[in-house]
Image: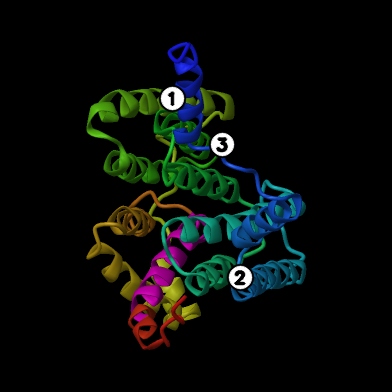
Amino acid sequence: MPGSDRPAREAAMAGILEPPPAASPPRGRRRAASRHRRVRHLPPPRAALRSALTLAVLLLIGVLVALAWSTDPEHEGPLPPGLTLAAVLLSVALVFAVAIRAGLGAPAALLAAALTGAYPEIVLPAGVGVTEHLAVVALLTAVLLLLGRTRRRILVPAAGLLAGVAASVAPLAVAAAPFLAAQAARTLHRRTRVPTLASAGAVYFATVAVGWLVVGVDPGAAPVWGTALLDTWVQAAPIALAVSAAALLLGAASAQLRPLAGYALTLITLSVWPDGDEVVRYTVLLAPALALLTAAAADRALRPLSRFRSPAPAR
């Protein structure tokens, strides 16, 4: 019957009108496309060369710092020479990482790393292994955590823990606490700001309390009429003092660098305050802050030069 083959004709017409399944490319083309995707994700040769050169310069800075420390056999502080040198080298690497994460260019980050290793040489007892070297490592790691962009509810309390460890081994490191809190508050979301800061503050104060009990720190015991840190710098390195003062002024004028500048100014104020401490302790704690501020000022001064670079070729 003519109507009996109607479903068959409709099925045939449906098969004709339905788009055919996408044919998979030949095996050779699949390999070529996969290889093209892998090559596209690789850095260009110029970027790879720039990264290798940056790493080589950073390693050279570390070698020079190690050689400078090895020429000074006097280590009268509580830390052994090997631990002191390891803390200094780790501080140099952490300052470079903080500068890169904060948005500075590679030349400015290398400048910050070099200054971090050079600033302690301003004072005569540069080889003294004070506990502030360990505090600097903890504080820089805390700053690196605060610059993280994800999992802020975990990173901010972890930064509070590290800041508490720094204040436990070096009581002068408490000067960094309000500025770390201000940096954390600037980057936290409004809905999570209060609970996250509260948990970080609880972790910080608990760590400081336990640390001071274990170490036996007496907050009321301090030397009399402290150190003439500025006088020492005027006599030993007036150029470094002038550069640091200019960097402090520029940092205070920048909203992003103001917490770092405030921390440095607080330490300088404490160094000339009655009941001060030894020069080397303040210098060790000041070195990373002044190095980052100086590098940020240099990066800002060199940034207009990038406008005169030749434009990238059109793809």
Q: Is residue 3 left or right of residue 182?
A: right
Position in image of residue 47 (x %, y %):
59, 71
Q: Is residue 264 left or right of residue 107?
A: left
Indicate the secondary structure of the residue bearing disc 3.
Answer: loop
- Name the magenta segment's main secondary structure: helix
Kind of residue sitting beneath label 2: Pro
> Which dot, 1 or 3, sits closer to the camera?
3
Q: How many marks?
A: 3
What range is drawn magenta here?
278-301
Residue at coordinates 49% horizontally, 60% vertically from top-left? 100
The circle on residue 21 is: 3
Kind of residue sitting beneath label 1: Val
Residue at coordinates 49% horizontally, 34% vertically from top-left? 16
Mark 1 burial class by Cα count in 10 Å: few <14, some 14-19, many 20+: some
Kind of residue sitting beneath label 3: Pro
The colour mode here is rainbow
